[in-house]
Amino acid sequence: MLKLRRILNKDNSHILKVHFVLHVFNLIAKKIVNHPIIDPVVKGNKNLDNYFTHAGFWRKHLTTWQKENNVKHSLTTLCKKKWYTMAKVCMGVQEPEGGFRSLGIHCDPLIDTPSMTTTVINVIEDHNHFTANQTLVSLLKPVVDAIGNLEQVADIWKHILDSYKSIQHHMICFSHLLSWKPLKMASSMRNKTESSPLRKMRSLRCSLISTFGSSHLENPKARSLRLMIPRNMIQKIPIGTQKNSGLLNYFGCSINLS
């Protein structure tokens, strides 16, 4: 990243600091697209993209042609703030070249097809335009691939981070269950006259509900944890009240203890 910044600052001394690598590739795409030789090609691509994006009749026929000929790239809506979308526009225009030409042939006022503008027809019939655009696409493709790979890696790290947080949360709850340490919840603030085993079991139930949510009764992991209550702890629970009996039933304990 530091080496990339040095290269960027050498060619763009007016830029003080780059925070994201994606910005670097975006600037590279901008530099390519704004080159004087490339500018007419880009304008022609924009004309085709804009026309076929908004002309519903011709877009439908172009989409059909793409499916029949297994053309993957499709037209892309241009976002002026993201220069790499212009690269996608150029790539989207290049592959359906044959489709544009076939639609131009079918453009016939005698059968009441919508008329194409002269500008669009001139671009379609100019083979040199598509030849130059092929060169442009070959320059832009590595930039687009780099941006796509970086975005994919960033997304993977987000999923990894979310997974880590989830695992960490479950491990903390599991460690509390194994060590029988009451969590700092409302249930731990109950009347201190309750027996210590009773407070611990109430806290464990709250931990299970917090960890497994609404599935704390059916979840196999939660069920196995409920059955891990030591028998010597169960024998210390007073069973004279209905509330205590319900707590014992929750953990799968028998009420009639010998």
Image (tube, rainbow, N blue to C red):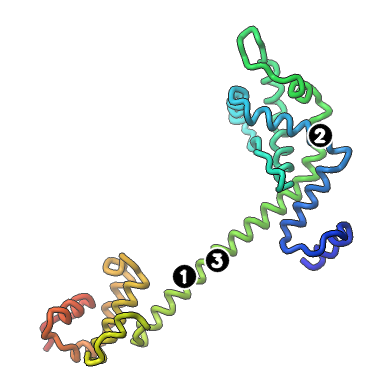
Residue 44: percent from left, percent from top: 78, 31
Using the image, determine if residue 68 lies above or below residue 7.
above
Residue 5: percent from left, percent from top: 81, 64
Instruction: Check residue 41 in the rendering and tell me which mark sits there, or answer none.
Output: 2
Tell me whether circle 3 and circle 2 mark residues in contact (CB < 8 Å): no
- At horizontal 72% and vertical 53% (from top left) the residue drawn is 146
Q: Quadrant of the N terminus?
A: bottom right
Residue 171: percent from left, percent from top: 43, 77
Q: Disc 1 or 3, which lies upstream in sequence?
A: 3
Tell me whether circle 1 and circle 3 mark residues in contact (CB < 8 Å): no
Residue 256: percent from left, percent from top: 10, 83
- At horizontal 69% and vertical 16% (from top left) the residue drawn is 105
Label 3 secondary element: helix
Residue sitting nearer the eye, 153 or 192: 192
- Determine which residue is flagged by label 1: 166
Label 2 secondary element: helix
Amino acid at pointer 3: Ile
Q: In screen coordinates, is 221 left or right of 119?
A: left
Residue sitting nearer the eye, 180 or 23: 23
Q: Disc 1 or 2, which lies upstream in sequence?
A: 2
- Determine which residue is flagged by label 3: 160
